[in-house]
Image (tube, coloured by chain):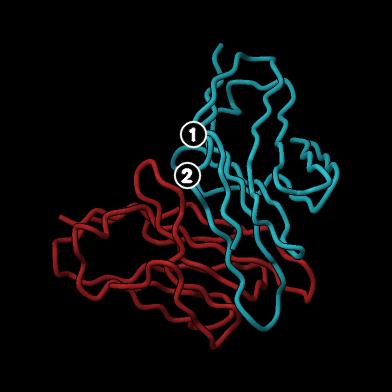
Chain colours: A red, B cyan
Amino acid sequence: NAGVTQTPKFQVLKTGQSMTLQCAQDMNHNSMYWYRQDPGMGLRLIYYSASEGTTDKGEVPNGYNVSRLNKREFSLRLESAAPSQTSVYFCASIPTSGGPVYEQYFGPGTRLTVT
Amino acid sequence: LAKTTQPISMDSYEGQEVNITCSHNNIATNDYITWYQQFPSQGPRFIIQGYKTKVTNEVASLFIPADRKSSTLSLPRVSLSDTAVYYCLVGVAYSGAGSYQLTFGKGTKLSVIP
């Protein structure tokens, strides 16, 4: 199993450009998440998808959109990139089985720079 | 979501036991306590989780007093490879309908010195 994969690993955008960050997991997990991590800071939740077909806003959703394409894939789109969106983006997933769930599996991250 | 407070940084020599304490005064009855580890340029990795008393696995131990208002992550005999940021998280974590969110604070940056 590859676990959680993210593409691309690195990206440089100009202000106003758009792009989509891809995330996929092969563990048959129901819930998926997008976080951003700024230098020296903890992770902040952007959006999450509790199950296929549903998405919800997290702590910092402004400037982003998401799509839960199917159970495996959860993409994050920046429609008009801004320098404030320069960050490392992590995708995560968790197994859901009706009981306590606490172990999030994280991808390797996408380092995005907006100039 | 219960707020957590933990030291910003800690230093330790190799071979020593390291204890990182996290305060969570407003922890709710259904909340679990979870610790993650993050190496530079990597995503966080789950290391241990507990509800009360003591939990031990191959990586660490987690001590939770009876009032559950704090918890202590214990790393035995640390090595240079344990240099990382450690996050304490508190929250309900049930699957199914409804939201499920974990809140990551700034964590504790542990530096292990040779």
Q: CA distance from mark 1 to mark 2?
A: 7 Å
| Residue A27 in the image, given as x and y percentages of width and height | 66, 67
Q: Which residue is mark 2?
A: B106
Point 14% across, 61% down: residue: A14
Point 46% across, 54% down: residue: A43
Mark 2: give few (<14), some (14-19) or many (20+) Cα within 10 Å: many
Dots 1, 2 in contact, CB < 8 A? yes
Q: Which residue is mark 1?
A: B8
| Residue B66 in the image, given as x and y percentages of width and height | 83, 46
The answer to which of B11 and A25 lies nearer the viewer is: B11
| Relative side of B23 to B32, left or right | left
Which quarter of the figure has residue A75?
bottom left
Which quarter of the figure has residue B91?
bottom right
| Relative side of B62 to A75, left or right | right
Counting the numbered discs, the total is 2
Name the subunit of mark 1.
B
What amino acid does circle 2 point to? Lys
SS at circle 1:
loop
The answer to which of B2 and A34 lies nearer the viewer is: B2
Mark number displayed over residue B76 = none
Please state, as top left, top right, bottom left or bottom right, where the C terminus of chain B lies in the image: top right
Please state, as top left, top right, bottom left or bottom right, where the N terminus of chain B lies in the image: bottom right
What amino acid does circle 1 point to? Ile
On whether disc 1 and disc 2 are found on a single subunit, the reply is yes
Name the subunit of mark 2.
B
| Residue B86 in the image, given as x and y percentages of width and height | 58, 39
| Residue A98 in the image, given as x and y percentages of width and height | 78, 76
Which quarter of the figure has residue A1?
bottom right
